[in-house]
Image (cartoon, rainbow, N blue to C red):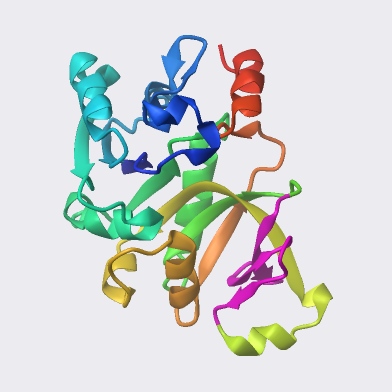
Amino acid sequence: MRAMILAAGLGTRLKPFTNKHPKALAEVNGKSLLQRNIEYLQQYGINEVVVNVHHFAHQIIEAVENNKGWGSKVFISDETTEVLETGGGVLFAKSFFEKEDNWLVMNADILTNLNLANFIQADQKLARGTENYIATLAVTNRNSNRNLLFNTAGKLIGWKNNTTGEEKWADIKNHTLAPEAIVAKAFSGIQIVHASFYPALTIAGKFSLIDAYLQLAATHPIGFFDHTEDILLDVGKPENLEKAAGLFK
């Protein structure tokens, strides 16, 4: 399996560090987030990784080259001209995954001890079924400003911003579902994407993976893998960088 680490974002929540550096090079106990996630993937035999870059792209490229990919084969997907958001970034890196049955995508600013072997096994179980699953999304039951919404069969049907009340639905009919028929989960920023993703996708340019999944979920099932018991830290904000130092040595 190959993987993609999404590292092109501006990292505005990590200012002032990101005024001069990309967020993927923020450090926890002397190791950058990028290094930690490349080494995390190595634990599960994932040694070929593409990293998309935009904000201070040259710093990430230099870090990869100077450290010889920290032992992995690291490819660069260069979005210097325009940051394409998460979905556009995965689409732009299409050539890297065209021969893969599935691949893992994760945000550079996530640190976790999620057991990827268990995640991959759960995804393979869905893939072996009779339905053509597009992806499996890692989720937890934590409090979040935004939730992915699934039906009781475990399939993605929508998204909700809990602060503004904004909702997006894969099928507008899902809006009428009773609350007990909707399962809300917080997305972990980690997913396994299947080869059927690219041919089914009908949007292009600059877009989020969430928008892509909601477009696709209208005709293709997208499942979830709950890892609520695991450590999961969004280290895109300074207070969580400090917390991460006590959890990841």
Left or right, 185 with reference to 222: right
Bounds of the magenta segment = 144-170
Residue appearing at x 38%, y 55% in the figure:
85
39 in the magenta segment: no
Left or right, 83 with reference to 24: left
**Position in image of residue 152 (x %, y %):** 71, 71
Q: Above or below — where is 218 with respect to 117?
A: below
Left or right, 105 with reference to 29: left
Query: Residue 202's quadrant in the figure?
Result: bottom left
Q: Above or below — where is 81 with respect to 232?
A: below
Query: Residue 26's quadrant in the figure?
Result: top left
**Position in image of residue 145 (x %, y %):** 70, 54
User: Relative to the observer, which residue lies in front, 105 or 59?
Assistant: 59
Residue 211 appears in the rendering: yes
**Position in image of residue 245 (x %, y %):** 60, 15
Quadrant position of the N terminus in the picture: top left
User: Relative to the observer, which residue lies in front, 195 or 170?
Assistant: 170
Quadrant position of the C terminus in the picture: top right
